[in-house]
Image (cartoon, grey):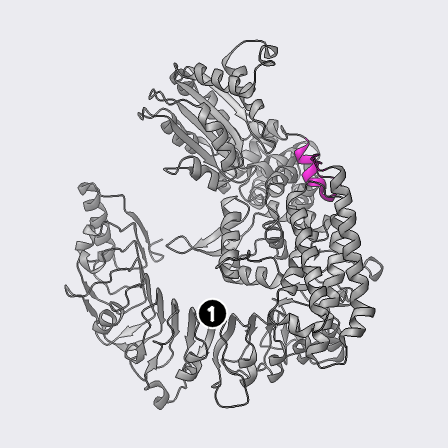
Amino acid sequence: MAAYTAVISLLQTLDQPNISKLFHDHGTEILDSLRATAEYFQDVLENSCNKSFEEDIRVVVSEVEDVVEMKISKIIKGERWTFGILRHHHMLPVVEKMDTTKKQVMEILSHDADQILELTADSLIGASSISDPMLSDKLKDDIVQGLDGDLEIIDKRLRGPTSYLDIVTISGMGGIGKTTLAKKAYDHLPIRYHFDIFVWVTISQEFRYRNVLLEALHCISKKNPKDYDKMNDNELADLVQKSLKGPRYLVVVDDIWSRDVWDSISQIFPNRNNGSRVLLTTRETDVAIYANTSSPHKMNLLDLDNSWKLLRDKVFGLEHDHPPELKEIGKKIAEKCQGLPLIISVIAGHLSKTVPKTLESWKYVAKTLSEIIASHPNKCLGVLGLSYHHLPNRLKPCFLSMGDFPEDFQVDTWRLIQLWIAEGFIRTSSGSCESLEEVAKHYLEDLISRNLIMARKKRFNGEVKVCGIHDLLREFCLIEAEMTKFMHVVRTPFSPAQKPNFRRFSIQKYIKDGHKLLPPVARSIYCFSNLGLPYEPRIKLLPILPIYRHDPIIHGFFSCFNHLRVLAIFSSWFSTFPLVITKLFHLRYLQVRCFDNIPESISKLLNLQTLICDGHSSVTTLPRKIWMLKNLRYIHLTGASYLPSPRIDKNLVTGMPNLEEFFGLCYSSCTNEVFSSTPNLKRLIICVSSDIPRNISDRLLDMSMLTKLETFKFYWKSYLVDPITIFVFPKSLRRVSLTRCYTFIWEEISSTFIMLPHLEELKLKHCLAKDDVWRLTDKDIFRSLKLLLLSELNLKRWEASSDSFPNLKRLVLKKCKDLQEIPTDFVEICTLESIELHDCSTTAEASVRNIEQEREDMGYNILKVYIHNSHRN
């Protein structure tokens, strides 16, 4: 995997704009040769089962990229490093190494072109899991708790009145109990009485069409298997079809991995309109939907009660009581398993066989849960290894990168995507019109569909806002990444003699002098703990986190990493912005925390794509030269940040054409010059400080030239003017959120936002209007609005009809304590799926209950109603 990542990274480096101009004369010929060899390596790594040459490819490709990047850096810095010198003393040796490695790979492949080799020591986890296709079957059979609800759903589908052949699907991550649920249904007495023939076939990753047919015939017929030896596949398939044509059958297709496999076997199941069923289990949600788009059943993780029940029963037995003093710590252990039955069963086995049933011993198990899981690779990590090794190579680095983050860390989707791009994991195919962000989103959706990454938070339209990963999957990532030299996560001390030969590092635990141990070839550094650098004494402002001061040691530390692409410091603060960071020419992603303004020298980071800077000050000033960063896509800043006009200095090449998101732009910087120089903005978050001058806040804010703007958020802290009237919005807006806006009138809300034809989401938070009645006329129609959120408003009456919100799906009201009721005509909004009330009036709650009952009486789709009142709980 590290080899594939290195190859993609090199190709991205060689694909940089204007790189040919830097390598003039014969340099372009060498670049073309390197690119051709790298593309050959990419093709081999994607299509060959032989892994024996991966380490050789990784080493030589990484060395080539080091030299190319060093050449670029020195040219940009103006140092005299001529092409001739480069060619003979720097580039030529690695070019020859690339050619030699290519010849060696071609020779190996020529000897085993027709042979499929099993994975070797390159991935111990994968080997152990693939070698035993029945791995953990006995373990799975013991998982029974928490499946009663799922069984009831599957039972209804299997024995339902539908006469045509129905494909019932069960999907979920590895170890969640899909096979167990299918087995429970297969053995369920009402189902046994309902069907005439029962067939169980297991697909797994090594699909053999003939084996599936033989498995099916073994269930159907009592013939000797040798009777089928002389029959070809078509004859066997015909025999299966004929055997299933008459009686009502149930076929379980367990552990199917791809659409192609389903297409291959689905034709053998005849549809006689007699209520026959196929029950399919898969880890791939995409495959489940492909087999039956109507209602795939996705299994969820166990809740805490069922997790504890499973753990307790496996340790003490169904008929034995547990010591009362172990209940609390037992629940903590069950909670740490995060609802995955596979882990619970393994930990239960460990508790029952090797650990004394004492409070202290169980507390130790709770502390060392990850180590226990890692010590059972065949039982735990091997099961998940199947999912990982089934991934196409392009997705593997993206999945393994989830190990960069600590346990239970929830990462914003936008941040994850920008990190993938900066790391070099994303590459568009030739001729594709998709952007890198669009390709990365597809990768994320694919990994979520495969139940490897979890969507922790979603928008109302299904877009994923926040991602996470199960701790067991994370543990697999850490082991696999370490084995393949993809990444090193610093969790335990290591000495200079053990300096790891990696290029990606995640520091998740404080290690004394750990900053001295990272190699200069590091490409990525994630820091979630103290770097071990000198810092100032604790101050009252941030008594928990260290504040790094300006120090030669800090300068020496950062100046080592000339190849660094990602520097993400999550935990520590700098008293002043470390200027040495601005010398890291290849930096693409920078996340720091400091109490100082960003310096002018940031303009040297010409490759920078993402800039995240958390500062204590409520108002910061950006340097004018930031406009030189043409590759910037994302700017995330704390508070209100002043951005000087790009046209003040005529010597600057103005404009950030690739900028898509600016979080924290000061209102006073919202000028025609700024907007015209950021024409591709898609998301804009404006902050207004309380000390804004009146003459600035009274001017019109015209954003109409931002024709690609989709999301607009506004944080207002002034009582000076009505903010709604100062905006001229672009027609492209889909999401609008206004926070702490005052002195507007409700009629302006209607007249302003009905003019936005694509507006799907409107949020008003902590706002104070001059009037307290929102009255919508017949002409006030929010045609595209799907989500409306009103929070902490002084609204008392709301007069509207269903025609005002013809496509509304979700209505959320929070702390609108003066609002008397929801418009009764909302019962007629056919698209409405849910209404949520949080700490609202009792009369508003009653009106929602009435709407819920009326919709039920009228036979409309079920309306989900959620009412929470903390004062009455």
> Magenta includes 125?
yes
User: Residue 158: where, in percent of width, then height?
Assistant: 38, 26
Residue 822 seen in the figure: yes
Q: Nearer the viewer, residue 746 or 23?
A: 23
At 63% across and 40% down in the image, what residue appears? 385
Horizontal arrangement in the rendering, residue 628 relative to residue 538 (left or right): left
Horizontal arrangement in the rendering, residue 534 relative to residue 628 (left or right): right
Q: On screen, 568 above or below 404?
A: below
Residue 355 seen in the figure: no
User: Residue 610: where, in percent of width, then height?
Assistant: 56, 69
> Magenta includes 505?
no
Residue where numbered disc 1 is placed:
660
User: Residue 126: where, in percent of width, then height?
Assistant: 67, 39
Q: Nearer the viewer, residue 207 or 382?
A: 207
At 69% across and 35% down in the image, what residue appears? 116
Read off the magenta span: 113-131
Question: To which quarter of the image does residue 387 belong?
Answer: top right
Q: Residues within 10 Å of mark 1 (few under 14, many from 20)?
A: some
User: Residue 677: where, in percent of width, then height?
Assistant: 45, 79
Q: Amino acid at mark 1?
A: Glu
- The secondary structure type at the circle numbered 1 is loop
Q: Nearer the viewer, residue 141 or 91?
A: 91
Q: On screen, 536 above or below 413?
A: below
Horizontal arrangement in the rendering, residue 677 relative to residue 382 (left or right): left
